[in-house]
Structures are given as C-alpha cells and as structure tokens.
Image: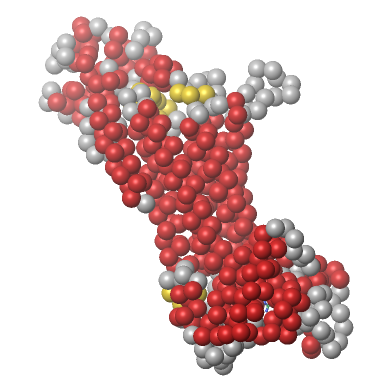
C-alpha cells in the first residue's frame, strides 16, 4: 500500500499496482508551471478547512493544525525553500503531501469533500482575479501617461491620416486621446470579465457535489467571491472565464500593436514626429547610424502570442464533453503567458510614453504639406451657398493648380482662387491655416484644442474615480 506521508507517493496511488512510467510522469505533470498558483491554492485550502470546521466535519483543533501547517508551507514557498516534486504532479498534490509530512495524519483530512477538480478551478479564478487587478493598475498608469502627453500637446498640429495619406490636420493631443479611449474600453472588458470570473467552484468536488454538509456561502465569503457556481458540472469543467480574459488581453494587445506601429513610423527618418528615449531602442551591429525602436516592435510582435493563446484556449475547450477532462490542464500556460505579456507590455509602454520627445515643428510641417485644409476650403464654399459636391469639384481644381505650381493651397493668389469660383474673397485665407482648421472642429469629440482639453478633464476625473 502507498504511504501518503511518504513525500514522493502519489495520493491517488491506492488502486494502482504498477508505478507510473517516468516519461509519462514528467509528461503529465504541471507543477513546473502551476506552482505559481501556490498562494491561491493555500488560500483556498485554508478557507475549505475553516468551512469544514464551521460545519462540524473537522474539529476546530484539526482545522487549526491544518491552517498552521498550510501557513508554514506558504512561508517556505515564499522564501524559495519549498521542494517541488514532479512525481507529485501538480501544485495541489505537492502542497497536500507536504502538509501531511509536516502535521501528520490530520493533514490527510484536508481533502474531505473536495476534489482537485473544484480545487484547480478555484485556484485559477483566485489567481486570475489578482492578475486582472494587477493588469488594471498597469493599464491605469498607461492611461495617465497617454493623457499627460495629450495635455502637453493639446495645441500641437499634425497631419491626420486615412489610408496613411494626409487627410486633415488634427491636434496631437486629440490623437493621443484616441488611444486613451481605446484603453478605457480595454479596462471595461477586464472589469466585465472579473465580475463573471468571480464565482466560486469549490463544493462541486469531482463533478457532482459532495455528501458532506458543506456551507459554500461561508467559504465564498472567506475567499471574497461575489457568487457561487450554481451547477457542479459547470463549475469544474468550463474555462470560459480564461477565454474571456485572454480575449480581453488580445484586444488590448491589438491596440498596443497599432499604437506601436505608429511609434515605429513616427520615429523613422521619413516622419521624425517623435524620438523615443535611447533606453527603449537598440543599435545595429553593422549600421552605425541606426537607432531601432525595439520596444514598440517587440510589443507589436507580442500581440501575436496573446492572440495565439486565445486560439489555444478556444481550441482546448472546443468539443470537450462534461465535466472535467485532463485537457483542461493545458489552459495554464497560455493564460499565464497572456497575462505576463500584457502586464509587461503595459508597464514598459507607460514608461516609454513618459520619456518620448515630440518634434512639433516636423509635425506642423508635415500637416502643411499634402493639402490637409482642402476640406476646409470646400466647407468655406458651402457656407457661401455652393452645393458641397460642386465645392468638392472646385477645390479639386485648386489642389491641381497648387500641385502644378508646387505650392500649398494657402500660397495660391486670391485672383487664382477667384478664377475657380468668384464667390471666394480675402477671408478665405483664415480658413486655409492649420490652426483655423483644427479650431473650427469645436464640438464633442472634435480635434479643436478646446475639445482636447475638455476630454482630458473628463479623463482625469474618470481616472481619479477608479
Ligand atoms: N493539474 C490538474 C489541472 O491543472 C489538476 C486537476 C486534476 N484532476 C484530475 N482529476 N486529474 O487541471
């Protein structure tokens, strides 16, 4: 017979006559990566033991010994002094066997009314709940950094693009606030996900519930769960909360990849809109002039692995019959990798933005090229009672005239403009300036500096409320 106080014997060894093949043992083990949930596993076990004493399944002395034993294990793990064993497969069995080795027979009572199936489902939720809170903190730092740039650059004029062709002038502050809006929605997805994830599986046991008179609500209160999984089969089997979280992470990383693409373009010699601090760039071993925007490039790349993790999780859960299947163990690496990647990317991004230099003159000069105020000229004609389609045609001819003579729209003479449309008068030139163009878009969501400032005020208020 196996001896569960022996630190390498598996707690499930009873019905087996042959030892596990050593390759199979290593192949099926998850302890190398699931040990990162140790703190949450111990927290769940302490709540479970406390609940068992509360309902009289354990005596309070037994529960006290178990809790003390678990706390001492937690301290050892924290100090890096705990010996993890592959033979004990996962974080749960490693801790349970260590408990019995430390406190003796009473340790074997911890698993009463519980299974690793509801245990692992609980651990992941507790772990991811903390990760969401940590990611949200980093996200808030990045939101603040984005708003800080927007505030400094509320009046800075740059070309706005569609199809990466100069479209209309915008303020750089407005552009930054566009990124802020995306980050706000990213945060909203995390909040939604946290609320659905924050339900307790414990009590579902292996799949059907347990014969002991457990008090799930008591346990849920100890673990600060907002709710309880109301079906035991569902509680142990689904990982949709992980899919949801990684999906939110993938959407967030997609935003950072687009943001990165802009920083990469803007820091090139062709744009020179911004300069990233040396701390976020590297040089080339062969081309001495190079300063490569490695950090945004790498984050653009890292968006791929988070999307990959999402696809892994979707495929992992697809077609699984109820309830728990060992497949589920494969949820951990993608989900851990996704949260690590997002946390790291957000952290570095906030620092990078805070240190980014903005080349206002280059942005302004770029906006001045490319006839970015052509729409303003059309709007001017409309105000003089020309139909928009006709105005569009007239301005098209004005642009042609400017291209042919290598001038900007502003540089055309009044007589030339009048030859295209006689209603044009001297006042037209105030509409053709970049400043006039952005200031005129003065409504909620528009690019006018006054609107950017108002958006920043709303954003700061929102940030201080969360
Ligand atoms: N390591 C397992 C996992 O991550 C824990 C649950 C194992 N349960 C079982 N019946 N084999 O999913």
- Indicate the position of residue 279 as horizontal and vertical percent values: 60, 29
Taking the spot 49% from the left edge, 33% from the top edge, the residue there is 353
Give the tally of numbered discs: 0
Taking the spot 35% from the left edge, 9% from the top edge, the residue there is 407
Q: How is the image coloured?
A: secondary structure
Q: Is residue 121 above or below residue 355?
A: below
Q: Quadrant of residue 49?
A: bottom right
Drawn side of residue 246 relative to residue 438, left or right: right
Res. 219 in view: yes
Taking the spot 79% from the left edge, 87% from the top edge, the residue there is 14
- Indicate the position of residue 172 as horizontal and vertical percent values: 38, 28
- Indicate the position of residue 182 as horizontal and vertical percent values: 41, 45
Drawn side of residue 445 relative to residue 189, left or right: left
Which quarter of the rendered picture does the N terminus lie within?
A: bottom right
Drawn side of residue 186 relative to residue 237, left or right: left
Res. 317 in view: no
Taking the spot 67% from the left edge, 68% from the top edge, the residue there is 72
Drawn side of residue 113 relative to residue 22, left or right: left
Q: Quadrant of ligand 1?
A: bottom right
Q: Quadrant of residue 156?
A: top left
- Indicate the position of residue 394 as horizontal and vertical percent values: 24, 20
Q: Residue furthest left?
A: 385
């Amino acid at each position: 017979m196996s001896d569960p106080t022996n630190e390498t014997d598996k707690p499930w060894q009873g019905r087996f006559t042959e030892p596990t093949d050593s390759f199979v043992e290593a192949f099926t083990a998850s302890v190398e990566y699931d040990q990162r949930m140790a703190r949450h596993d111990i927290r769940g076990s302490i709540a479970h033991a406390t609940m068992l004493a509360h309902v009289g399944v354990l005596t309070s002395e037994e529960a006290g010994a178990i809790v003390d034993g678990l706390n001492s294990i937690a301290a050892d793990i924290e100090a890096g002094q705990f010996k993890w064993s592959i033979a004990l497969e996962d974080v749960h069995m490693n801790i349970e066997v260590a408990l019995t080795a430390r406190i003796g027979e009473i340790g074997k009572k911890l698993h009463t009314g519980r299974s690793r199936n509801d245990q692992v489902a609980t651990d992941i939720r507790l772990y991811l709940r903390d990760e969401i809170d940590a990611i949200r903190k980093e996200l808030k730092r990045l939101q603040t950094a984005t708003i800080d740039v927007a505030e400094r650059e509320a009046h800075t004029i740059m070309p706005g693009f569609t199809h990466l062709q100069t479209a209309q002038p915008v303020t750089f502050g407005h552009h930054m606030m566009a990124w802020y809006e995306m980050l706000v929605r990213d945060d909203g997805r995390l909040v939604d996900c946290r609320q659905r994830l924050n339900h307790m599986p414990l009590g579902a046991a292996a799949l059907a519930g347990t014969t002991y008179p457990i008090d799930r609500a008591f346990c849920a209160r100890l673990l600060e769960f907002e709710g309880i999984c109301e079906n035991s089969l569902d509680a142990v089997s689904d990982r949709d909360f992980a899919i949801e979280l990684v999906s939110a992470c993938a959407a967030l990383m997609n935003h950072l990849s687009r943001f990165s693409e802009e920083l990469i373009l803007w820091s090139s010699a062709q744009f020179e809109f911004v300069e990233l601090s040396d701390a976020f760039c590297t040089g080339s071993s062969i081309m001495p002039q190079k300063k490569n925007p490695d950090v945004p490039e790498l984050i653009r790349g890292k968006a791929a692995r988070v999307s990959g993790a999402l696809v892994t999780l979707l495929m992992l859960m697809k077609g699984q019959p109820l309830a728990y299947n060992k497949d589920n163990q494969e949820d951990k690496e993608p989900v851990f990798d996704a949260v690590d990647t997002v946390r790291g990317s957000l952290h570095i991004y906030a620092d990078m933005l805070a240190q980014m230099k903005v080349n206002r003159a280059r942005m302004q000069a770029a906006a001045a090229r490319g006839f970015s105020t052509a729409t303003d000229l059309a709007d001017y004609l409309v105000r003089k009672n020309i139909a928009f389609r006709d105005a569009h045609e007239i301005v098209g001819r004005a642009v042609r005239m400017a291209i042919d003579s290598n001038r900007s729209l502003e540089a055309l003479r009044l007589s030339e403009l009048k030859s295209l449309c006689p209603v044009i008068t001297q006042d037209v030139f105030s509409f053709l300036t970049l400043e006039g163009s952005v200031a005129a878009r003065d409504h909620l969501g528009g690019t006018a500096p006054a609107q950017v400032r108002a958006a920043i005020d709303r954003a700061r208020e929102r940030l201080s409320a969360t």
